[in-house]
Amino acid sequence: MKNSFYFLLFFPFTVLFAQNTYLVKENDQLRLTSAGASFLAKLPLHCIHTEYPNKTGHTIEAENDAKLTPKQLHPAFYGCLDWHSSVHGHWMLVRLLKTFKGLPEETEIRKILDDSFQPDKMKTEAEYFTQYKFSRTFERTYGWAWLLKLDEELATWDDPQGRQWHQHLRPLTQQVVELWTAFLPKQTYPNRTGVHPNTAFGLVFALDYARTVKNATFEAKIVEKAKYFYLNNTQAPAIQEPDGSDFLSPSLEVADLMRRILTPAAFTKWFNGFMPAAGLQNILKLPVVSDRNDMQIVHLDGLSLSRAWCLKGIVEALPKTDPRRANMLKASQHFINTTLPQITNGGYGGEHWLASFALYALQ
């Protein structure tokens, strides 16, 4: 039955993309249609209440801990295999409601979100981070980043129910901001990995959030740390990317952060010294995904999508006359066009998270 479900999702997705039903091109940019939004919504709707399989990330501190179910540990964000994927699945549903009016799934989406954003559940989610000896580092910083992205989406939504959910999320949001604020002074070195602990990716979302909610203190700490980590970086080893399970580009994530904190002129000068020509040429190549049923190898589909959004942002920061822009935009569109029809082709290992990456790459 499950295999039939996956086939039914994948088959129309591939065909309709070929007919330009899910995507249209406007001003050389790809835009998701209402039909495409409706399709993508089905993926988090399917997994947000799917408790198993589950990768909790919980450190067992006593025998009783071993008996706790994912839903007991995280009453709101227990589905979609892991906490962070559940969080950005919620972000995606909020984003779709905001962007596409009258979705056929709107009633179902609102019901699911309202169930998750109940005050008692958010209180339990917030308490988790201080309830256990090792839980203060839980989901640092990838899950923290997506939680702030979710709250940023709610904070900018003129919707009565959205405003209510934003208020209900506050205990958890404040907990994450406090944890991150305490962590930044202690973080001596950035994580330059292509997976969850990547520091630059986390700081990008944290900075966007801080600026949106006008938390000047948090913003200043992020900018200060970003400059400390990356301002003097040169000759990024982009020629060596990717690693075999990357879903983020270590070099592009740094550039995506620095374009946010430098003026366009200063960023261009920095980028010229940071990104070697051979390295840029290398990361404009489409990653090869040999087995989408392998939950690590399928990360490379996510890499295509995250490269796409980084490249689009970097291009906007470069001068209109910069000769690199055309190839970067062409690669960005190629990554999206090639990867989107594949996101349901590997089963649950990709379905539980790739739709969020797709939507963020397209926005």
Image (cartoon, rainbow, N blue to C red):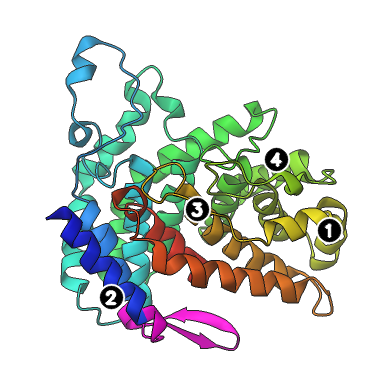
Mark 2 or 4, nearer chain start: 2
SS under mark 2? helix
Mark-to-mark CA distance, 3 and 4: 34 Å
Mark 4 near mark 1, Cβ–Cβ under 8 Å? no
| Residue under label 3 | 289
| Farthest-out residue, left | 1
Q: At label 1, which amino acid type do we have?
A: Ala
| Residue under label 2 | 12
Q: Check if residue 29 falls in the magenta segment.
A: yes
Query: Dot 3: within a 10 Å radius of its alpha carbon, few (fewer than 14), some, or many (20 or more) residues?
Result: some
Which of the pair 179/14 is nearer the observer?
A: 14
Mark 2 or 1, nearer chain start: 2
Mark 2 or 3, nearer chain start: 2
Mark-to-mark CA distance, 4 and 1: 27 Å
Mark-to-mark CA distance, 2 and 3: 21 Å
Mark-to-mark CA distance, 1 and 3: 24 Å
Q: Is residue 156 visible?
A: no
Is 172 rendered above or below residue 24? above
Residue 225, labelled with which disc? 4
Mark-to-mark CA distance, 2 and 1: 40 Å
